[in-house]
């Protein structure tokens, strides 16, 4: 497993462009099986979760190539309707393929996705919605078998605005005669991107970004060339890396309207933040102040995915910040590693109390999940001395070339291949 070594204490300065969104491109990749044609997805990030999705596409009989951030997918010859266990285990969010495979093949077989580093990750909301649409679902030997002779257009209420369940229903209903309505739908920008991609293929989806999404079934979809949105969590992570090192950084290619909740907390914590159409400038204040209370919420609330990086920033604030992680039940794996670096953090269930310390010290730490790993990188950039961060493949799942991008901003960071 690769490691990163980071020598802390250097201010980040400079400009970088943020890559395409992991959480937008994954459902868009699933959508490329729908039309049985040739699709081109641009601004596709070079990250491990995309490589895993390409493996799934190939396992299903599609052709898929990623070159220079352009993914081409030919789903004409798709033959499979099953996602093998080892592929599901590589990436839990492969569940997002279920709706698309059902739409294309009328049946789907996937292995139970199981939990992951941040929680149990149940799929009951996905299952309940598909059953309501007429999908027959059985489970045996660790696999979920779905089949549907005919899917019906229903009004589906989500008891929680699940991102994945919203996307699965959208993908499962594009060919369903009539109007499928999702109420209490997730409002994340990635849902809007999926809507825009599906409509570019000839689907009729409306309402994404709001709590009610309508999908009017169509007969077929055509080839698409689509450019996915920038990654709002990666953008926020680099802004935190600037703030924690008291450096000034310009992040280009970001949609400022996607990251308003994060920018508001960055300002509360002492940074001056200026936005233009597609870039954000973060200039440090004299001190890093605590945030009063950071509660993760569904969009447009404060994103759970940026909680860990902001906890690294709060670890060196002049005061106490309280966190409440309301989305996932075990998303504090980075706390024990931050403690090794001298942070003062107490957790109790979903609450974490972070008392800022004057400085963190470099230590040997290990990523326990994707965003927790990014938090350790941010902390190491500010820490006194050298840190070694293990399990870097977690970070590689969602951050393209993190060491290259941070080096461009002046960080002393390198990858040690294992
Ligand atoms: C998506 O995960 C993202 N992943 C996550 O990003 C993100 O944290 C999450 O949405 C919330 O914004 C992708 O888009 C690939 P959910 P997803 O369904 O769809 C519970 C990252 O770091 N739930 O909105 O799995 C669930 O346990 C990743 O980039 C059910 O109970 O999230 C969680 O507590 C991590 N039953 C909450 O809802 C279900 O059937 C939110 O889950 C589904 C979800």
Image: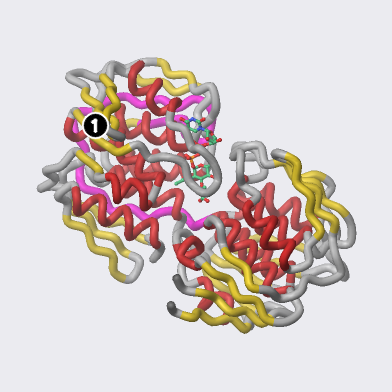
- The residue located at (80%, 46%) in the rendering is 322
Q: Residues within 10 Å of mark 1 (few under 14, many from 20)?
A: many
As drawn, 25 above or below 351 = below
As drawn, 148 above or below 207 = above
The image quadrant of residue 64 is: bottom left
Secondary structure at numbered mark 1: helix
Asked if residue 271 can be seen in this view, the reply is: no
Q: Position of residue 236 (x, y in %)?
A: 62, 59
Q: Is residue 32 left or right of residue 271?
A: left
- Pick out the residue farthest to the front: 141
Please report the bounds of the magenta region as a residue range. 205-231
As drawn, 16 above or below 105 = below
- The residue located at (27%, 56%) in the rendering is 54
Q: Position of residue 20 (x, y in %)?
A: 45, 59
Q: Can you tell me whether the CB of the residue at mark 1 lies under 8 Å from the nearest atom of ligand 1?
A: no
Q: Position of residue 15 (x, y in %)?
A: 60, 75
Q: Position of residue 258 (x, y in %)?
A: 59, 49
The image quadrant of residue 104 is: top left
Q: Which residue is mark 1?
A: 102
Say which quadrant the N terminus sits in.
Answer: bottom left
Residue 304 included in the magenta stretch of the image = no
Say which quadrant the C terminus sits in.
Answer: bottom left
Residue 229 included in the magenta stretch of the image = yes
The answer to which of 208 and 337 lies nearer the viewer is: 337
């Amino acid at each position: 497993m690769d490691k990163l070594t980071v020598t802390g204490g250097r201010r980040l300065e400079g400009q970088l462009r943020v890559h395409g969104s992991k959480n937008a491109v994954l459902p868009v990749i699933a959508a490329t099986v729908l039309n049985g044609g040739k699709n081109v997805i641009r601004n596709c990030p070079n990250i491990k979760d995309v490589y895993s999705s390409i493996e799934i596409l190939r396992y299903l009989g599609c052709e898929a190539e990623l070159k220079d951030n352009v993914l081409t997918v030919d789903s004409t010859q798709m033959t499979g309707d099953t996602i093998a266990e080892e592929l599901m285990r590589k990436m839990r969010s492969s569940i997002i393929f279920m709706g698309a495979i059902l739409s294309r093949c009328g049946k789907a077989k996937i292995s139970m996705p199981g939990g992951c580093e941040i929680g149990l990750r149940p799929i009951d909301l996905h299952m309940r919605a598909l059953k309501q649409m007429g999908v027959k679902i059985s489970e045996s030997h660790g696999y979920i078998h779905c089949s549907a002779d005919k899917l019906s257009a229903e009004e589906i209420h989500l008891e929680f605005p699940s991102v994945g369940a919203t996307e699965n229903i959208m993908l499962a209903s594009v060919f369903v005669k009539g109007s499928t309505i999702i109420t209490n739908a997730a409002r994340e920008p990635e849902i809007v991107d999926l809507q825009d991609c599906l409509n570019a293929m000839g689907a009729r989806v409306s309402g994404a970004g709001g709590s009610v999404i309508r999908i009017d079934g169509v007969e077929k979809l055509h080839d698409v060339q689509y450019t996915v949105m920038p990654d709002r969590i990666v953008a926020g992570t680099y802004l935190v890396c600037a703030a924690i090192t008291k450096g000034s950084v310009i992040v280009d290619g970001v949609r400022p309207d996607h990251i308003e909740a994060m920018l508001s907390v960055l300002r509360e914590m002492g940074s001056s933040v200026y936005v233009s159409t597609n870039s954000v400038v973060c200039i440090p204040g004299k001190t890093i102040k605590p945030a009063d209370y950071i509660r993760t919420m569904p969009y447009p609330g404060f994103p759970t995915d940026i909680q860990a990086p902001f906890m690294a920033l709060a670890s060196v604030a002049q005061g106490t910040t309280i966190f409440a992680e309301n989305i996932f039940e075990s998303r504090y794996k980075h706390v024990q590693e931050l403690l090794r670096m001298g942070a003062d953090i107490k957790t109790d269930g979903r609450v974490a109390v972070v008392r800022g310390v004057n400085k963190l010290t470099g230590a040997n730490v290990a990523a326990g999940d994707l965003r927790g790993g990014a938090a350790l990188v941010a902390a190491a950039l500010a820490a006194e001395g050298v840190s070694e961060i293990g399990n870097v493949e977690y970070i590689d799942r969602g951050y393209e070339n993190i060491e290259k991008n941070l080096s461009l901003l002046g960080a002393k960071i390198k990858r040690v291949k294992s």
